[in-house]
Amino acid sequence: MSEPKKLFIKTYGCQMNVYDSERMVEALGGNGYVEVDSPEQADMVLLNTCHIREKAAEKVYSELGRLKLIKDERPDLKIGVAGCVAQAEGQEIMARAPVVDLVVGPQSYHRLPEMEKAIQKGEKPVDTDFPEEDKFEHLNKRARTLRGPTAFLTVQEGCDKFCAFCVVPYTRGAEVSRPKDRIVREAQELVDAGVREITLLGQNVNAYHGHEKGLAGLIWELAEIDGLDRIRFTTSHPNDMDDALVDAFGTCEKLMPYLHLPVQSGSDKILKAMNRKHTRDQYFHLIDRIRAKRPDLLLTSDFIVGFPGETDQDFEDTMDLVRRVEFGASFTFKYSTRPGTPAAEKPQLPDDVANERLYALQALITKQQRAAQDSMVGREVEVLFEKKGRLPGQIVGKSNYLHAVHAVGPESDIGQIRRVKIVESGPNSLAGVLV
Ligand code: 5AD
Ligand code: SF4
C-alpha cells in the first residue's frame, strides 16, 4: 500500500466552517489523504476561510504569504482556498496569490476529490458554483474513527435576510434546507460512531423548512434517536423563533437550555437601518416567552457597535438592552465595512468612537458572563465529558448550559454524561466534583 498523502486544513470563522472542514477531510480521505496538524508536514494545505469581517478575510492573505515560504522550499506542496473568501473572490485569489492551486466555494467542496486529481496534473481549478446537486449526497458517510461525543450537523445553509451589514446572503447564497430524512440518517451515523450531543447548524437554522413542522419538528424527530442525549442549534434569527420552537424549550428534554439569539443592537433606529425587521420590544417579548418555558435558559447574542449612523443614544440603548436581558455570554464586533453590502454605502463612524463603544460593551458582557458562570457554584449540572484535562486524573466536558467543566474522574467517563456539583468558577471554566 502506498504512503498516505497528508492534508492540513486550517479553519477560520464559524461552526459551519468547522463542519465543512470535517467533511472536506472525509472527502479527501477517498483520495488517500490523512489529516495532519501542521502545514510543514503536509502535501496539501487547505484554508477554509471566512469573509464576514475585513480582518477575517485579510488573515487569509497573510497565511498564504507564510505558506509561500514553505512552498518555495517544497514546490510539490499544493495549496487550496475554500470557504467564503473563495466564494467571494474566486479567480482573483489566484491573481493576488499565485501560490494557490485550487479555489473551492462552500457549495462545491464535494467536487474536491476531482479537483485534487486535476491539481496533480498541474491544473489550477476554480469552482464557486451553486450547483443543482446536493453536495451532502455526494460526500462520504460520516467517519467512525476519532469521533468525540459531540458533533456539528449542518441542516440549513444560506440566508435570505439581507441584514444591511452582512455578506452571508452573497457568499452562502439563498436559504436551502436539507431534507429531514437525510439529516436523521446522518445523525444516526454520528450516534453509531459514539456521538451523544449534536449541534444543528445553519446560517439561519431556525428558518429550517425541510420538515413540515420546521426546526422544532426536526428536533422532535431527532430526539427519538436512542443514544442521542443532547440537541442544540445555532444560529437563529429572532423573527424565525416560531411557537413550536419556543415550546420545545419547555417540553423537549433533549433540547439543551442554551440559545444563541443575535440581536445586534438595542436601538430601534439602528435595528431598522440594519434591516433586522424587528424592534427591541419584540426581542424583549420573545425572550420573556422563551424564559417562561425555560427559566434557567442561558442566552447569548451577537452585537455590532459603530454601525453607520449609531449615536451615543443608540449605543446607550444597546447597553440598556444588555442590562435588561442579562446574557450568559455574547460576541461583540466592531462594524466592518463589507463591499457590496448596503451599509457600506453609508458614512462610516470614526474608529475611535467605535473602539470606545466596543470596550464599554465588552466590559458589560464580561461582567454578565462572570455572573452567569459564578451562579453555577453550588449547583448540580449534567456534564458530557469530552476529553482528558491538562492535569493528571482530570477530565473535561460541557454542562447543559455549555459551560466548560473540569473534574477529577475516571477516563472511562469520557463520552458519558455525569452529574457534577460545581465547586469553583475559574476564569474560563468551572470546577466540579462527580456526585
Ligand atoms: N461587521 C461586523 N460584524 C459583523 N457580523 C456580520 N457582519 C458583520 C460586519 N460587517 C457579525 C454579526 C453576526 C456575526 C456572525 O458576525 O454580529 O451575527
Ligand atoms: Fe447575515 Fe443577517 Fe443572514 Fe445573519 S440573518 S447571516 S446577520 S444576513
Image (cartoon, rainbow, N blue to C red):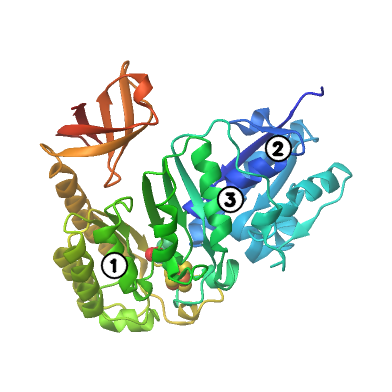
- Residue positioned most to the left: 378
| In the displayed structure image, the side of residue 49 where residue 371 appears, left or right | left
> Regarding ligand 2, which quadrant of the image does it lie in?
bottom left
Q: Which residue is mark 2?
A: 29
Is 7 placed above or below 160 here? above
Residue at left 20%, top 73%? 284
Q: Secondary structure at mark 3?
A: helix
**Mark 2 element type:** helix
Which amino acid type is shown beneath numbered disc 3? Asp
Q: Earlier in the sequence, mark 3 or mark 1?
A: 3
Q: Which is closer to the viewer, label 1 or label 2?
A: 1
What is the x, y in percent for residue 328?
23, 53
In x, y percent, where is residue 172? 58, 66
Whether pointer 3 and pointer 1 mark residues with C-beta atoms closer than 8 Å, the reply is no
Image location of residue 411, percent across then percent down: 37, 20
How far is the residue under mark 3 from the one under mark 1?
A: 28 Å
- How far separated are the C-alphas under marks 1 and 2? 40 Å
- Label number found at residue 20: 3
Residue 322, image x, y percentages = 20, 65
Q: Which residue is mark 1?
A: 246
Query: Which tag, 1 or 2, sits closer to the chain's start?
Result: 2
